[in-house]
Amino acid sequence: MGRVGKRGLFFSTDALVALIVIFLTILVIYPIVTLNIKDSYTESDVIKVLSTLKIGEVEDSYAKSLIDDNKIRNINKSLLEQIGEFCVENVSAAQELSQSVLSNLDIEKNFGIWYGSKAIYLRNSSPYEESKNILVDRRVISGIKEGNGTTGYSGSAYLSNDIQTKYFYFGGYMGDGNITVMMNYSGNLTGIEMEIAINSDFKAYINGNFSGQWENSSDEYTPKKYDLSAYYNNFHSGTNNITFI
Amino acid sequence: MKKAQAWGIDISVGIIIFILGIIVFFIYTLNGSNEANENLEELNLNGDYIMNTILSEGFPSNWTLVDVTKIGILKNDKIDQEKIENFYNISRDNYTLTLALFDTKYNYYFFFENMTIHGNDIEGFGKPGVNSTSINSKNLIKITRHTVYSNKPKTVYLYIWEE
């Protein structure tokens, strides 16, 4: 009877153990598979807005008054560059400009702009020091340094060859029968050469103009070079059609 | 009780325990409380994707009503009046096409302050017949982004919801 009783518990216990193992495995693995969703783009959006808008084009009364008062020397600077320049020359102007330009934005979370350690614009309901999660976006402004003049000149010169070599790739096997390919270039041609593997003689038409009758390459696996320079007048800057018949 | 009877009852009890356990697990754990969260996560991802698409140049970059494959309203990182009017036209005339282009099954409504379309001020556009205050849905996500419109910083919003 005792042996029968032990055997009687065997399958039930096994089922319970199996369930417990499955549950534990799922409970351990499940929390790891979570989606990481970015819940705010405010920091990158605002930096992008300030980098995009030029001080001379922004529809803002304070910015226009600064231009009218000749406090802004270069109206082609971005708002971010202008705020950066004010940061080293006139901090209150930087703060007022930021305040004026960003006042219409609907920013629900705590938000701030710093130049180095200097707070330029703050819109927060709780202290920065008590924040738990901080999202940061940075943009480098060149040409300004605290204590130095903000206007200067820099220059560089370089030489380059104005003749370029441009390659157009047919891209492997092109097909059978009449084949037309397109080729783009800009400028003036000084020469053109084509390298293809083709198993029969062919005529070439460049933009519909006959451009020579050519012999096939030795076999369909060994490419042969064809000099089309004599027909370069048939090409024009832009898109060209080359047809093989 | 005979041996064979004891084994038969034990196997039956074991199978019943196992199946009941699995059923209870699926009902209360996987299909229960997480369903709402998963829906919201999916809505959030869809909303992010749609808003990112809208706040791009689209494709082709100078897309028209004829050749659009991706709706984006920016040009040089600013809202382009012609593109936003084209977006408005498509959503008004063929809302389901915009859903297909955004690759979403959810409804959307795009709006911001002082939006001007064809010379008229409108609140926003998206699913025909709704505005920002008339959407009635249990699962509704609001995506907020910032960009430039009419040479001013502008906060733009997208509601996305399921019906």
Image: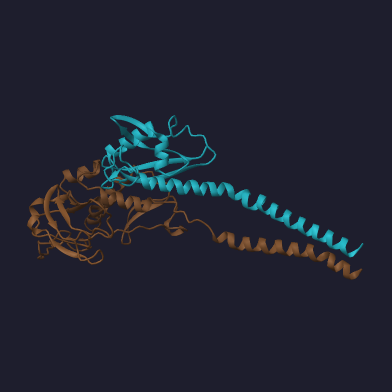
Chain colours: A brown, B cyan
A21 horizontally vs A133: left or right? right
Would you say B161 lies left or right of A56 here?
right
Is residue A4 in sight in this rendering? yes
Q: Where is residue A195 in the image (x, y as percent from the top left)?
A: 19, 63
Residue A150's quadrant in the figure?
bottom left
Residue A92 on image: x %, y %: 27, 52
Using the image as rendered, state which of residue B145 and residue A120 is in the foreground: B145
Most extreme residue toward the bottom, as rendered?
A3
In screen coordinates, is A167 left or right of B44?
left
Quick one: B22 or B2, which is closer to the camera? B2
| Location of residue A158 in the rendering, given as x and y in whole percent from the top left corner | 11, 65
x and y percentages locating residue B81 in the rendered image: 27, 37
Quadrant where the N terminus of chain A sits is bottom right
**Residue lying farthest front?**
A200
Q: Quadrant of residue A164?
A: bottom left
- Which residue appears at 21% of the width and 63% of the height? A147
Tell which of B130 and A87 is nearer to you. Answer: B130
